[in-house]
Amino acid sequence: MKMEKGMQLIDGNGKFSVDGLKDFMTATEFAQSGLSYAIVAIIGSQSSGKSTLMNQTFRTNFEEMDAYNGRGQTTKGIWIAKCSDIDPFTIAMDFEGTDSNQRGEDDTAFEKQSTLFALAIADVVLINMWYKDIGLEHAASRPLLKTVFQVMKRLFKPRKKTLLFVLRDHSKTPLEHLKTALLEDIEKIWAAVAEPETLCSAPLREFFNVEITALPHYEFQEEKFKEQVSQERFGGSDRLCFVSENTSSIHVVNVEVNSGVAQLRQRFVHSIYPGGLVSDREEVEPASGFPLRAEEIWKIIKDNRDLDLPAVKVMVATVRCEEIAGEKLKCFTFDEDWLEMKKTVQDCPVSGFGGAVSSILETYLSEYDREVVYFDQEVRNAKRRLLLSNALMVVRDAYDTMLMHLYSNTVNRFKTSLEQSQNEGQQYVAAIHFYSQLCMREFDQGCEDAAIQQSEWNASKFREKLICDMLSEMMAKYKKRITRALAKRVESLLEAGERDTWASIRNLFECNTEAAVSEFSDAAVSFNLNSSEIDTKSQHLREHARNLLEMKAREAAAAGRVLSRMKYRFSQVLGDYENSMSWYNWTEEINLDVVERNALSESLRILSIMAAMRFDGMPDQIEKVLFSSLMDRTVPDPSLQNTFMGATLDPLASDTWEEVSPKATTLLKPEDCKSLWMNFIEKIKPMMTGARSRQDGRRRTRRYAAAGAGVAAAAAAAVAGPVAVVNAGIAIFLRWMRR
């Protein structure tokens, strides 16, 4: 696609061709020019030969007017084309002529819009005018200059724009005279334009580099015209001074007038290099942003809004940097090396992970930097940070997976090493010191290898979790030790139900728990914990031990188990008594009521022991209350009303124990103990009935034995004599009476 023929950028109705410009950029590869380009626009009256001048100067093919068909509008809207064989890359823009009767009343509006667009977008603006218009008050070019200056003063801050006046159809009038007259006209028009409030009498030189060249008549002197336009060599130039009519001082204005042949085309070769036509241009923007910049500027102009070029510059930079960042992010996301790394790390840790990923990231960040280097620095830096942030979001899951592998492997290695050391008989604390430091060192080295250079990530969370899990492994070890030391022995003490049960449990608790805590504290030093953290962990061990005691106590305090132990204790006391009695022993038996009370007392002590956990050893009144209420029968009849303030006198009709230490934990409430005791009494009734029955049996047996003994004695006495019989009978009678 040859773009020397040009494409219509903006049609006669003011519609901007987005797709056409996109095709133009692709065909000409303009975007690859970076900052090495120049844009030249031409404005002037209709049918003044603008298209012809552009074609002859830049070897483009804009449509030209056919004089044989009459003079009229040829170029409609704004056209652009690539200039042939000019370094740097140069874009030519051909504008619709001003002062057209074909556009009518709309001419002024479009004239201002197109002029503003030319001044905003181009580096050099050619003003095509007839030399005979110089000095004329109502010349066709005068309104155009007024429009140019109005636009510059109202909408632009002082910024150098090159205005190259091309005087057409130059004949005999000396160029020096034309130059002087033109400069005076320019100064008059500039001074006549109203100053905006924000700009106080800014001189022309702060806005423009003004240059002047002249060309012969194209039709009557065509060969000479073409020679001057396209000649490769050019002569010298003069720097001129002139007196402004508004001041008495002389201003040096950057005006250059060719002394001799114009050599117009050659003026645009190396135009951006030092000493070139636009070497002092400011705030050049990358060629890749030209489509966005042109479209946005035209949109603002069409909407009749104030044109803020810095804002447009930022907008273009923002859009282009976002586009480039998006491209680089996509390229990174689908990079084969990255995808392979991402896949591999899902299964196992990858050696050199951090360096490899950092290198891939740096590749695309560097590409971004190269492509956006000419855009607004603040914008490109912001979009770079966003690109990096988005890329790191892509990497984060893989990075976390890598650290998770390191963490898991380290935890497993720590556990395995400790188990092996224990199997080998090594001292546990010493093994903790050695293997914790070894494993943490290996973990830190792995994290350093996995670090992403472009990120501020660190492995602190995984390291903290690792230490926490290693400590948990230790805690579990010591908890098991405490459990083994306490569980069975506490159960046995509670089952025994001796008077010193809770004192024995406290001693057992303190000895074993503090021994474990002391050893744990020595081992925890390996993890560089501060004293408060060690104290916290130690307290957890104590709480575990206490919770274990409470669990065992509550298991033992289950109503069924307590009742079973009370019955067992009662039967044990009763059995001991009965075992001591002989069916044939003539000694006096203990009163069974006394035996029953002793058995009840022993059973009630079990109930008292299980009523509450006594961790602090403080005395309480539980046993006294239970004995007075249940054994001594001082509890009033519930059916009787108490007239004293309506309060109950039954200390067991409550759900709390009075005069009990705050640290004691209730296992059985007073009302539960009362209920349990009543149930117990019912359960032992058969035992007592049986005991009494057996006691009666023993007595009957003894009577029968005594009677038998009397008969035997009588028989023996018969042999011995009457006196012996009488004495034996008396002895048997007396013994029987004692029964």
Image: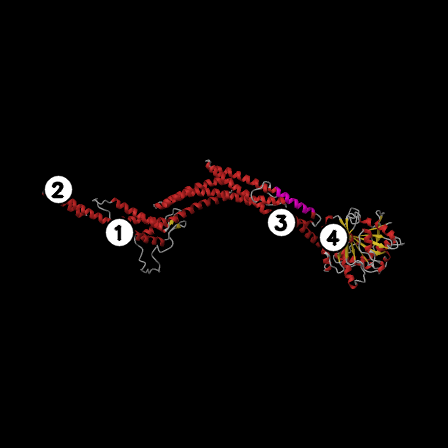
Q: Residues within 10 Å of mark 4 (few under 14, many from 20)?
A: many
Q: Residues within 10 Å of mark 1 (few under 14, many from 20)?
A: few
Q: Are marks 2 and 4 in contact (CB under 8 Å)?
A: no
* Residue stretch in magenta: 355-370
Mark 4 residue element: helix
Q: Which mark is residue 24?
A: 4
Is residue 57 rendered to the left or right of residue 493? right
Amino acid type for the residue under numbered disc 4: Phe
* Dot placed on the residue nearer the N-terminal end, 1 or 4: 4
What is the residue that sits farthest to the right in this orientation? 172
- Residue 315: image x %, image y %? 69, 54
Report which residue position mark 2 lands on: 716
* Dot placed on the residue nearer the N-terminal end, 2 or 4: 4
Q: CA distance from mark 2 to mark 1?
A: 41 Å
- Residue 132: image x %, image y %? 87, 57
Report which residue position mark 3 lands on: 390
- Residue 679: image x %, image y %? 32, 53
Asked where in the image residue 442 lies, by quadrant, the reply is: top right
Amino acid type for the residue under numbered disc 1: Thr
Q: Nearer the viewer, residue 23 or 185?
A: 23
Report which residue position mark 1 lands on: 689
- Residue 736: image x %, image y %? 17, 47
Q: Residues within 10 Å of mark 2 (few under 14, many from 20)?
A: some
Mark 3 residue element: helix
Q: CA distance from mark 2 to mark 3?
A: 123 Å
Amino acid type for the residue under numbered disc 3: Asn
Q: CA distance from mark 1 to mark 4?
A: 118 Å
Amino acid type for the residue under numbered disc 2: Ala
Is residue 593 rendered to the left or right of residue 674? left
Q: Nearer the viewer, residue 366 or 575?
A: 366
What is the residue that sits farthest to the left in this orientation? 722
Asked where in the image residue 353 lies, by quadrant, the reply is: top right
